[in-house]
């Protein structure tokens, strides 16, 4: 091989490597977007039905695993404009996680004569996240987290990477609202793709997370003192 052929061959190989890296990152991004959308669509079923779940006058709430899975799909379509195709292991694992959590909570949510049951969107989300992560068996991990000063449940604490993105990127005044951040990085010594999506307090969140700071909410927890539109949480996904 002369010098030029060698150079061209080498450059082509490098270009291919770069392109395949870019393609891989793109497909990971698509996967992460879809999975976090399903996760949020499922959690929305719980928030929309919160008053119904807490209604002491009703026994059976009609929120079986299948019903919630179907409502999740409807919410997904409403949010993304696309029908949800449950055609990958990860998407199957997410829907299975939603169904498992609903199955396990039927007795709790259908208990008659009890109002507040502690079956809240964030608690549902944490249970779904744990199930999904365990179904994926080391291939992916999802987690609901929050800015450090707002974390109620220690299990939801942001790790260093998450805290750094939340504090130094998501909280910047000019950061595009709702935009996810992702990068190829190291996680516990492994090369991974990480993705994190910011979430903000809406009106419905403030009865528990709003003002006055430190006052008790209906769950008995302490309010954060958050305000409308403020960064209140983030969904974080690791793809190994
Ligand atoms: C009825 C009260 C209530 C409402 C309404 C509520 N939350 Fe929460 N939220 C809680 C409680 C309690 C926890 C702790 C859950 C746990 O123990 O895992 C929590 C946890 C969270 C977390 C996880 C981080 C942490 O603090 O552990 C996020 C993020 C969050 N809430 C965001 C929201 C958003 C966004 C909304 C509105 C869409 C909302 N919450 C509405 C009570 C509430």
Image (cartoon, grey):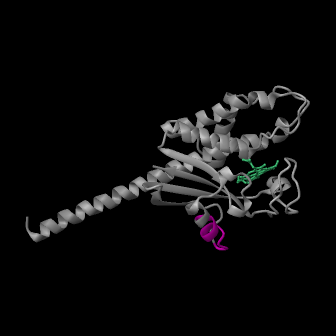
* Residue 228: percent from left, percent from top: 79, 62
What residue range appears in magenta?
A: 165-174
Rendered image quadrant of residue 195: bottom right
> Was residue 7 drawn as part of the magenta stretch in this picture?
no
Q: Residue at x 64, y 31 (%)?
A: 100
Instruction: Tell me if residue 81 can be seen.
Output: no
* Residue 21: percent from left, percent from top: 37, 57
Rendered image quadrant of residue 66: top right
> Was residue 172 drawn as part of the magenta stretch in this picture?
yes
Front residue of 113 and 157: 157
Tell whether 113 sits left or right of 42.
right
Rendered image quadrant of residue 167: bottom right
Q: Residue at x 63, y 44 (%)?
A: 39
* Residue 123: percent from left, percent from top: 72, 44
| In the depicted structure, whether residue 162 falls above or below residue 240 | below
Instruction: Tell me if residue 73 can be seen.
Output: yes
Quadrant where the N terminus is found in the figure: bottom left
* Residue 206: percent from left, percent from top: 83, 57
Residue at the extreme bottom = 173
| In the depicted structure, whether residue 45 falls above or below residue 66 | below
Q: Residue at x 84, y 47 (%)?
A: 219
Q: Main secondary structure of the magenta part?
A: helix
Q: Residue at x 57, y 62 (%)?
A: 160
């Amino acid at each position: 091989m002369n010098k030029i052929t060698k150079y061209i061959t080498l450059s082509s190989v490098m270009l291919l490597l770069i392109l395949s890296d870019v393609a891989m990152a793109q497909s990971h991004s698509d996967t992460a977007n879809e999975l976090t959308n399903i996760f949020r669509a499922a959690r929305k079923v719980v928030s929309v039905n919160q008053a119904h779940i807490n209604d002491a006058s009703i026994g059976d709430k009609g929120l079986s695993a299948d019903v919630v899975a179907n409502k999740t799909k409807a919410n997904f379509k409403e949010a993304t404009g696309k029908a949800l195709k449950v055609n990958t292991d990860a998407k199957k694992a997410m829907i299975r996680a939603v169904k498992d959590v609903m199955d396990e909570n039927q007795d709790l949510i259908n208990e008659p004569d009890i109002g507040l049951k502690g079956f809240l969107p964030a608690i549902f989300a944490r249970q779904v996240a744990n199930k999904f992560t365990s179904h994926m068996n080391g291939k992916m991990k999802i987690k609901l987290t929050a800015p450090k000063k707002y974390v109620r449940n220690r299990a939801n604490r942001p790790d260093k990477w998450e805290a750094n993105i939340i504090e130094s990127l998501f909280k910047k005044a000019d950061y595009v609202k709702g935009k996810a951040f992702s990068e190829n990085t190291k996680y516990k010594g492994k090369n991974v793709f990480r993705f994190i999506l910011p979430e903000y307090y809406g009106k419905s969140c403030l009865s528990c997370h709003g003002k006055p700071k430190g006052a008790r909410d209906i769950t008995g927890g302490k309010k954060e003192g958050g305000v409308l539109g403020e960064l209140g949480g983030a969904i974080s996904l690791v793809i190994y």
